[in-house]
Amino acid sequence: MARNNGRTVYLRSDGQWANKANDALKASGFHADREEACLEAARMLAADGGGELTVKDEAGLIERRSIPAA
C-alpha cells in the first residue's frame, strides 16, 4: 500500500500548533505559532520526498501547499 506523503498543521484546543503526518495517529511536534509549525512540516515533507502540506487556520479554513523533494 502506498504511503500518504502529506502533513497537516492545525491549531489545538490548548493554543499550540500541531504538525502531524496524515497517516499518523499522533502529531510529530507542537509549536507556539503557525509559521514555526509550517516550516517544520515543510522540512519534514521535503526530506521525505515531497508531498502536500495542508494548513488549517484558526477558523478551520484549509490552505494547501505542494512541497517538492529536497
Image (tube, rainbow, N blue to C red):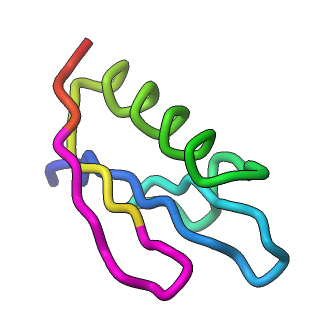
Q: Is residue 53 left or right of residue 65?
A: right
Residue drawn at 20 percent across, 20 percent down: 69
Question: Of residues 58 and 29, which is closer to you in this image?
Answer: 58
Q: Which residues are magenta?
A: 56-66
Whether residue 61 is situated above or below residue 44 in the rendered picture: below
Residue drawn at 31 percent across, 75 percent down: 62
Please provide percent x and percent y for residue 32: 78, 51
Residue drawn at 39 percent across, 52 percent down: 7
Whether residue 7 is situated above or below residue 36 in the rendered picture: below
Q: Residue lying at the far top in this picture: please name it.
A: 70
Q: How many marks?
A: 0
Please provide percent x and percent y for residue 58: 55, 79
Residue drawn at 69 percent across, 52 percent down: 33
Tell me the quadrant of the picture where the C terminus can be found: top left
Quarter residue 36 falls in: top right
Q: Does the stretch in magenta take in 15? A: no
